[in-house]
Amino acid sequence: MGQGYSWTQPDFGHPRAVKAHCRTLSKVHSREVCYISQSKFAKLGGVRVNEELPPEKTKIPLPEGTLAVGGGLMVAGISSYAFFKVGQEALGKEDFKPIVALWFATFVLAPGFFLPLEQEMGRALAHRRALGLGGRAIVRRIVPLGIAITGIIVALLAGLSSIATKDFFEGYGLVTAALIIGFISYAPAHLARGICSGQGRFSSYGIIMGADGFVRIVGCVILWQLDITNVGAYAMVVALSPLSGVLIVGLRGGLQTEEGPVAPWSEVTPNLGWLLIGSLMGAGLVNAGPIAVNILANDEQDQQVTAFGNGVLLSRVPLFLFQAVQAALLPRLARLAAQNDLDEFRNGFRRLMKVVIAVGLLGTLASFAVGPALLELVYDDVLDRRSLTLLAIGSALYMVALATAQAVIALNGHARVGLGWLTGMASFVICVWLASDDLYLRVEIGLVASSLVALLIFIVSLQRLLVAGAIINSDSLSDALLDRPFET
């Protein structure tokens, strides 16, 4: 049993000045308890009393929803690798090239435009849920906004469809149509994920993520077994699979919300602009490599485009592990932030970064040591050790940059993050333009340099915010926890 202390001064209360000295701050028997050293306690004017408190728990249970979300991420991640394998077995390396282009283009556009809506939906609903208010008005505000964004982008894509079909999708008009349909499909998927996270329905959130990948690979296997080699059919599987999870969760009643007060625009769009910039640039950066190779390659390099896409996917294994680390560790940082314990938040963030850096280093070393052999074993493709190592370094730097960006957002640094990703994207374009004439090397240098530039901007921003005494608020923290502008 621990020994309890209390304050004698009636006006001393439990001020922030005292909380700053707490080793830990927790709830015991519905009372706020500050664990503090005896020397600091005496200097602050405290007098010991004979009160026994139960020992502080050291084991922290997994946060609510960790397993459900982690399971969905696991299914989504594994199915992505399987889809690339089965698709290439069915279509061949050259004919799979338009699917590679479709894949990475879809995962620039969909998270880029819809993740901010998911973030704001989840944040606003979680805030109302904490206050005991219904969130249907939030949904009614954000859904029309999603429809408007979808309409604008679909109109732009339709206007550019002939160019995209000819220069990007090897003349396959159905693949261009699949890009448009896929973009439309991910709108309700992201909005549904926002509703589920904001309402604390993490099992439904996991179903939406997992069902997308599961239905995609099942559809691909069925087409393969039926000896269907029409590229457009596989493209449509990619385009329609996001709707499966939304349909399942919707039929289960997982998207229902309660009536509540009218939601002003200020409640749902306080940082939407910066989130859009950051999300679009962040999603663009992580998917820029295969898109750039596809644009720069000549007509005889179709297999090289597919091989590079396979290499990028393999280099994302650390990012896949990073998502699992996030699911387990970020909610603990959320609790520390809610207690406004910046010292422990720093310590927790350092621990998170150590894990992230370790995962990145492990992935880089693995790519250098066994990457070429593994790529040949899994996808029957060849990329040299240099390419796979540079791709792994770029992926590791992006992962560390993303984790740092989340901390900056938690400190209400949305604008800094948006500008950081924008600068990173500009760095990528400049490097690809000037670095080399080699198809792969110029893109690989761009991926490494751009992620490094973004990371440095985020590190400087985080240091300045912490020195300035920036306060973490629940809204910014909610945005940070959902900030993941990529799909595995």
Image (spheres, grey):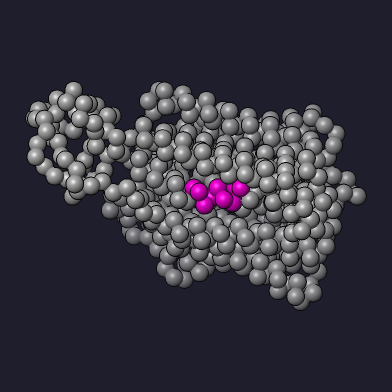
Residue 237 in the image: x percent, y percent? 68, 65
Name of the residue lying farthest toward the bottom: 226
For residue 32, side relative to residue 422 (left or right): left
Q: Quick check: 107 above or below 469?
A: below
Residue lying at 47% horizontally and 66% vertically, measured from the top left: 249
Residue 272 in the image: x percent, y percent? 49, 40
Q: Quick check: 73 above or below 108?
A: below
Q: Is residue 128 visible?
A: no
100 or 42: nearer the eye?
42
Main SS of the magenta segment? helix
152 or 246: nearer the eye?
246
Residue lying at 36% horizontally and 54% vertically, measured from the top left: 61
482 or 384: nearer the eye?
384
Residue lying at 35% horizontally and 47% vertically, measured from the top left: 127
Name of the residue lying farthest toward the front: 1
For residue 316, side relative to residue 45 (left or right): right
Residue 218 in the image: x percent, y percent? 65, 70
Q: Is residue 202 visible?
A: yes
For residue 453, side relative to residue 378 (left or right): left
Name of the residue lying farthest toward the right: 300
407 or 113: nearer the eye?
407
For residue 301, side relative to residue 147 (left or right): right
Give the residues in magenta. 318-326
Residue 176 in the image: x percent, y percent? 74, 56
Quarter location, residue 394: top right
Residue lying at 51% horizontally and 38% vertically, measured from the top left: 353
Q: Is residue 55 magenta?
A: no
Total marks shown come to 0
